[in-house]
Amino acid sequence: MPKLFEFGSLNENATLLTLDQVLQNVYLPILSYSGTRSEQGADSATTAEETPRRGSMGEASKGRVVIRDEFLINLQKFANHIGRTMQQLAGDIRLVMSDLVLTDDISELARNPEIVASLEQTLHDWEVTMASALEQQLNHTPQGNGTLAEMDFWRERNATLSALVEQLKRPLVEKVIAILSQTSSDSLSTFEYHKNELTKYYVEAKDNVRFLLTLERHFKNLAHGANFKVILETIPSLMNALRMVWIISRHYNRDERMVPLMERIAWELAERVAKVVNIRTILKESPATIKVKTSEAKRTLNQWKETYFETRAKIEASGRDARWEFDRKRLFERTDYMATICEDIHEVAQVLEEFYNIFGPELKAVTGDPKRIEDVVKRVDGLVKPLENVSFDPFNLRHSTSWRSVMDRFRREVGAIENEAKHFIDDSFQTLRSAEGAFDMLQNFKHIRSRDAINSQMMRKFNDILLQFGKEVDVIFALFKAGHVSPPVYKNQPPVAGAIGWERSLFYRIKHTILRFQEIDDMLNSDQGKLVSKKYLSVARLMKQYEDKKFELWREQVETHLLSYLKRNLLTRSSTGSATTRSGGHTTKDDVGADDDHISPVHSK
C-alpha cells in the first residue's frame, strides 16, 4: 500500500503551483495526445469494410472517446481556475483602509481638518490603486490564439475588477465618500472619474463573460471535439450563436470585438486541421485513409466560410441589424489556403490509389513480368518522399511558392511514371499469356478508378486481345490437326467417345473466350474482330465435321451388326466350371460394344 503514495514536503506557497504543474505537464498532455491519436484514426476507421463485430466495438470505443473528451474539457477548466486563483493570490489588489476610527457623526468628522486630510490621502491611494489595476488589465492580452483563451481573458478581468468594485461598496468606503462630500473636497471628482472608469470596464467584462458563456460549448467542441464530424455539426450552430451575440451584446456588436473573436475561431479550425493532416505522418497511411481525412478537413474549412456568408446574408435580409462587413482576408485567407493544400494532398492519395489499382496482381498474372511491375510500384512509393521530407510548413502561406514547386515536381514524376506504364502496357500486350485473362483485366479496369491516361491506353488494347485470340485459335487448330487421326484418350475410354471428348475439350477452350467477347458491343464488329470471328468459325466447322463423321460411322456400324450382337451368347460355361465371355466375328470389347454405353448428343455450334 505505501508504494501507491508519494512522500515529500510542500511549503504553503507551492501547493497550488505543484498541482498546476502536474496538470499542465502530465495529465493534460497525456489526454491530448490520446485524443490526437484517436482522431487521426477515427475518421478513417469508418470504412465500408468494417464487420458488424467491429461496428459494435466502434460504438463502445466512441463512448469512451466522448467520456475522455468530457474529462479533458473539465480538467482543462479546472487547471484554468487554478491558474486564475494563483494570479489572484499573487497579485491580490486591495484598497488600503484608514486606521482612523470613524464615528457615525459624519458632520462632526467633516469639521475635523486632520481627519479630512487623512481621508483625502486615503482616497488618493484608492485612486492610484484603481488606476494601476485598470491599467494593468488594459495592458493584458489573451494568453493564446484560441477561442478558450478569449474566455479566460474576460473571466480574469471580470474577477479582478469585480473584487475592486465589491470593495468600493463596503460601508467604510461609503462613509469616507460621505465625509468628503460634506466638505466638497476636490479629490472626489478625480475619485469618481476613476471609479466610473473601473465600473465601466467591469460592466463590459461581466457582460462579455455572460455572452461568451453561451458560446463556450461550441468553443470546446472546436478545441477538443472527437473528430471532424463533431466540428462540422458545431459550425452552423456556432455561427447562429455569434449572430445572436452580435445582435444582443452591447460590446460584441462592433467590428473591433467580433472580428478578433472570429479570427480565433478560424485559427482554432486551422490548427485542428494542421494537427490531423500532418504532411510528415499522414502520407504513411493508406490512400483511402488519407482521402477521408483530407476530404473532411477541406469540408470543415469550406463550411466555415460558407456558413459565415449564409449568416451574413440572413443579417442583411433582416434589415434591422448592423451588417457584417468584416475583413475577409483576416478571416479566410489562411483557411482557404489550407483547403487548397488539403486538396493537393487528396490528389496525391488519389494518384497513389490509381497507380496501385493498375499495377496489381491482375496485371502481373496477364503480363507475366512481375519484376518490371514491382519496379514501377517502387517508383510510385517514392513519389511521396519529397513531400514527407519538406523542410517547411505547407500550411504556412509564406511557403506557398515552395509548396507549388514540390507539387509541380510531383506531377512531373507522375507524368514520367504514366509514360513508362504506357510503354510497359504496350510491350506486355504484345506478348499476352491469355486473351481471356487480358479481357477480364480490362473489364475490371472499367470499374476501378485508375489514371485516365493509362485507362485510355488500356481500353485501346482490345485489338491486341483479338490478335492474341487469333493465335490461340491457330494453336488449337494445330493441336486438332496433329491429333485428329489418333486422338489422345483417357485410359479405358472408348475410342469414339474419347475422340469426340478430346475434340470438344479443344473446342470449348476457344468457344468460352469468344462468348466473353460478345459481352462488349461492337468488339467483334471491328475489322480485327471480323477476321478473328471468321477464323474461329472455320475451325469450329472443321471440328464439328470431325465429330459428326465419327458419330455417323459409329452409328452405321452399330445399326448394321446390332441384331447379330443381340443373338449371341454373352456367357459360356468352360470345362473348369467358370463363366467366360465370348467374342466372335469382327467385333471386340474395345470397339462398338464399349461405345454403346457412351453415346451422347452432338453439340451444336
Image (spheres, rainbow, N blue to C red):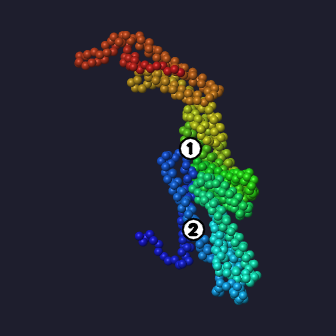
Between 241 and 320, the one lying in front of the other is 320
- Residue 420 placement (x, y as % from top left): 64, 43
The structure residue drawn at horizontal position 51% and vertical position 26%, both measured from the top left corner, is 508
x 60%, y 71%: residue: 84
**Residue 221 appears in the picture as rendered:** yes
Quarter the N terminus occupies: bottom left
Q: Find residue 363 and report its image quarter.
A: top right
What is the secondary structure assignment of the residue under circle 2?
A: helix
Amino acid at circle 1? Lys
Q: Does residue 34 appear left or right of residue 338 in this picture?
A: left
Instruction: Give me the disc on residue 79.
Output: 2
Q: Which type of secondary structure does the marked residue at label 1 adopt?
A: helix
Residue linked to disc 1: 371
The crowding category of the residue bearing disc 1, from other C-alpha atoms within 10 Å (few below 14, some 14 to 19, many at least 20), is few
Residue 494 lies, with reference to residue 282, above or below; the image says above
N-term mark: 1 or 2: 2
Residue 489: percent from left, percent from top:
43, 25
Left or right for 134, reference 369: right
Q: Which residue occupies 65% across, 47% down?
A: 414
Task: Please provide percent x and percent y for residue 405.
Answer: 70, 53
Residue 585 vertical placement versus 302 (above, below):
above
Q: CA distance from mark 1 to mark 2?
A: 59 Å
- Seen from the viewer's position, the closer of residues 48 and 409 is 48
Position above or below: 423 against 496: below
In the displayed orientation, state which residue is furthest to the left.
Answer: 576
Query: What crowding class fits label 2: few (fewer than 14 Cα within 10 Å), some (14-19), or many (20 or more)?
Result: some
Instruction: List x then y, in percent, for residue 502.
Output: 47, 24
Q: Is residue 358 left or right of residue 556?
A: right
Q: Is residue 368 visible?
A: no
